[in-house]
Amino acid sequence: MESLQELYRIGMGPSSSHTMGPRRAATLFAERCKEAAKYRVTLYGSLAATGRGHLTHAAVTQPLALKPVEIIERADITPDFHPNGMLFEALSALGNVQASWRVYSVGGGALREEGQPEPPAVYPLANMRELIRWADDSGNPLWMYVQECEGESLWEHFSRIWQAMKAAIRRGLDEEGVLPGGLKLRRKASQIYQQAQQLSAAVQRTGFLTAYALAVAEENAAGGIVVTAPTCGSSGVLPAVLYYLQQRNDYTNQRIYRALATAGLVGNLVKKNASISGAEVGCQGEVGTACAMAAAAAAQLLGASPHQIEYAAEMGLEHHLGLTCDPVAGLVQIPCIERNAMAAARALDCAEYALLSDGRHLISFDQVAAAMRQTGHDLPGLYRETSTGGLAVAYNGGSSVEIVENYKD
């Protein structure tokens, strides 16, 4: 498995696979082909189907903007390697192709080329069963495996990640008004946060968790700076749970960093053995993984054993199996924003449920991850980030193009 620095990335929303990845790819291609007279970018599959709402056009155009850029959408072609395919071409003044690069945005802002060897493994252990055995044999908590594999310097990265997460929450709580895009969706985080402060202690948990998750998800939808955890579309779940628990229990930042480490292990396992790409496996790979990560982090903070942490993560992923990715108008707003809030509440429920047990259960985390991957591949393509099924077609407020035509980055 790769470094957790590849899982937790700080960047602009609204989508790690449709915005961060394509922007990064365009930047790399511009550096390689500075002499081109103009560029042509072909977007395939999900990138073409929901690229306008996800700001993919702006993401690939900005790094290449010193030269003319032509963008071609081929939603009718879904590459076998990954649905989020891109073909970059550098053209001469006469329109001849001087250089080309086919690359894929595979989720979480990561890029892959077909046939390219996998990056060097930072973590030798690549499934939860081996991690639990390591914890049992060594007597150490799971977060110490992260330190063992990546060294002390990773804590500096977690410090930056946590600061960025908290900043997104605070910005989101301060902002009001309507989110960009044609849905005219009103921000709710600030209002819910104010209302939560007036509620009884028994109900405040739901109010604060909801407000924090919405704050980040709304910032992401507005193209703000968020942390992939594991993706932009699910970036509100883990910060909401960690921020709520820190505010409630006065946890030190060091304990939060350790929780981020354990959550990162969970996210890395799904990324390695299944997928965190909505275009590949649906929203179960994004919000489902985020819920599993947050459940594991919360369980650790609340004093769970490694076995209980594994159980919490398993439940967080299991109970999102089959969740489709069907963004209305191709925007990362409906149902994405509310799903962050629902998953944050469920993550804490999973952690507390696991703590009521001894951690023993029949279906393992590894089995659920394998089931999620197979379920995602079995889902028809219209339920995997194409906006051609589910809620995306149930909404009759206008076509995707009509809604996002004035949506600027």
Image: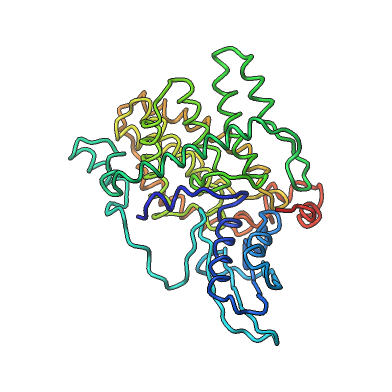
Residue name at image x 81 percent, y 51 percent? 398
* The one of 224 and 215 positioned closer to us in this rendering: 224
> Residue placed at 41% from the left, 41% from the top?
158
Residue 296, position as x, y percentages in the image: 40, 35
Q: Residue at x 42, y 25 (%)?
A: 352
Q: Position of residue 104 (x, y in %)?
A: 53, 66
Q: Residue furthest top?
A: 200
Choose top left, top right, bottom left or bottom right for residue 73.
bottom right
x, y percent for residue 40: 66, 75
Which of the two residues, 242 or 29, is positioned nearer the viewer here?
Answer: 29
Left or right placement of residue 108 versus residue 12 in this view: left
Instruction: List x then y, in percent, for residue 74.
Output: 67, 70
Q: Nearer the viewer, residue 271 or 156?
A: 156
Tell me if residue 210 comes above or below residue 204 in the rendering.
below
Q: Is residue 201 left or right of residue 265?
A: right
Q: In the picture, which quadrant includes the N terminus? A: bottom left
Name the residue rendered at 75%, 48% in the picture. 181
Please identify the quarter of the rendering in which residue 303 is found. Answer: top left
Nearer to the camera, 384 or 241: 241
